[in-house]
Amino acid sequence: MKVSWYNVVFLWISALFLLVNTINAQLVNSFTSESPAITCQPNGAETVVTITNGATALTNATITIQLGVGIQMVPTSTQSLQGPAVVGTAVNLNAPNFTVASWPANTTLKFSFRKKAICAARAQKISGGGFQDVISIKNSSGTTLSILGTKTVNYDVIYASLSITSASTSPVSINPGQTATRSMTISNGSFGQLEEFLFADITSAGKFTYSDFRINPANTNISIPVSAISTSGDSVKVAFNKALIKFIGDGDEAFELNENFVLQYKITVNPCCPASTVTSKLIAQWGCDGQICQTATDNTPSISVTSVQPTLTFSTRTTTPRCFDTPAKQTIVVANTTAYAATNVKVQFGTVNSSPNFDNAQQLYLAGPYSYRIKNFGTPKRRRLPN
């Protein structure tokens, strides 16, 4: 078989080129990622990278790691573990850069950093997508260098899944001014763990006030501090942080798989709430970085407010004669004819007159003096009004 010198030279040059590139290439000895990454876990999961430089020393080399969908580097988490110092300069947290100021030839470096999953990672997981990180290396001129060994790493992501069950209100039918007890069970049914989440009871304004929030009232009976509770209109929110979560489950400040607790609180119907059936929307919500990953809802709890508005009657009796400058005695009877309390009752009295002392705004004659006696259930009270 005849082989031309041209082919021999071409093969020799190609082999030499491959050998040079192999010598100068960076060898990624190992690229490992702690798996799974937990969505919205502040501390994140650890990634460890070991790379051996080729035959050419590098200065100001840049290692870039493109992280998976919805994955971000935890800032200031870079640690040099072996060899030349590695400094994290993550401008894009989804594709962080790491700088090596001086990297001698044939020298191995090892470093680690932490990464966290945000809400987009949960969406990626639910849609069936996977998670992979990819390494690239550039020299000080910005030229992308050849990489041998493991350039990618795959890993999994998990996330919490909250639910609200067994919601109840007792009694379900109450009068204005009375108080009912509401309770429910909040559970985490997935592998992800939470260090904080939010609960809210959402209703329309002007109907209820809330008090006495408790965790597991039948056993540990932990009172939730006022600092964790906020209101907006007639909606109430409870912020669960590690200080409260430690009273749930195994006490490790994380709300984990198959852990649950009973939340209980008091609902007082405002005195002037009209008769109606008021249905609340209960939500348990979590997320991170200003985003909401999941909202569990329960729209069933309701309270039936009965028609119990108090009815007041008003009557007067006046003595005779009614002469000028001669005091007359007038009896005003205000009666509540129902079994329900009336609050903030106000009685204005005076003579309607068109004299110069007549107050058009109040429709009262302002001349005096007046004296009056209030008698309530046999207890008289006296007071003299000023001129």
Image (tube, helix red, strand yellow):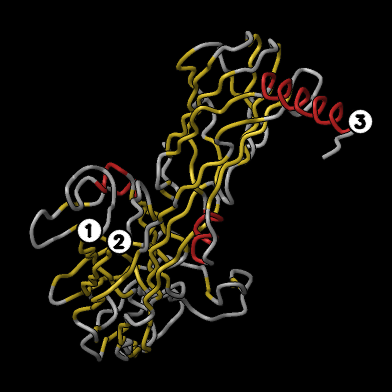
- Spatial separation of the CA atoms under disc 1 and disc 2: 6 Å
Name the residue located 46 percent from the left edge and 48 percent from the top edge. Answer: 155
Q: Amino acid at mark 2?
A: Asn
Is 17 rendered above or below residue 43?
A: above
Q: Which mark is residue 188?
A: 2
* Image location of residue 170, percent across then percent down: 19, 79
Say whether disc 1 or disc 3 marks the residue closer to the N-terminus: 3
**Residue nearest the viewer, comparing 387 with 122:** 122
Name the residue located 53 percent from the left edge and 73 percent from the top edge. Answer: 365
* Image location of residue 333, percent across then percent down: 29, 85
Is 40 rendered above or below residue 316?
A: above
Q: Is residue 46 left or right of residue 314?
A: right
Is 114 rendered above or below residue 363?
A: above
Report the quarter where the C terminus lies: bottom left
Query: Do tag 3 and tag 2 residues touch (Cβ < 8 Å)?
Result: no
Q: Which mark is residue 6?
A: 3
Farthest residue toward the front? 1
Query: Do tag 1 and tag 2 residues touch (Cβ < 8 Å)?
Result: yes
Say whether disc 3 or disc 2 marks the residue closer to the N-terminus: 3
Q: Amino acid at mark 1?
A: Glu
- Camera-near label (1 vs 3) is 3
Marks counted in the figure total 3
Query: Do tag 1 and tag 3 residues touch (Cβ < 8 Å)?
Result: no
Q: Amino acid at mark 3?
A: Tyr
State the residue position of label 1.
Answer: 259
Mark 2, other Cα within 10 Å: few <14 / some 14–19 / many ≥20: many
Q: Tag 2's secondary structure?
A: strand
Name the residue located 50 percent from the left edge and 22 percent from the top edge. Answer: 111
Please indicate, yes or no, whether residue 126 appears anywhere in the rendered image. yes
Q: Tag 3's secondary structure?
A: helix
Q: Tag 1's secondary structure?
A: loop
Please indicate, yes or no, whether residue 319 appears anywhere in the rendered image. no
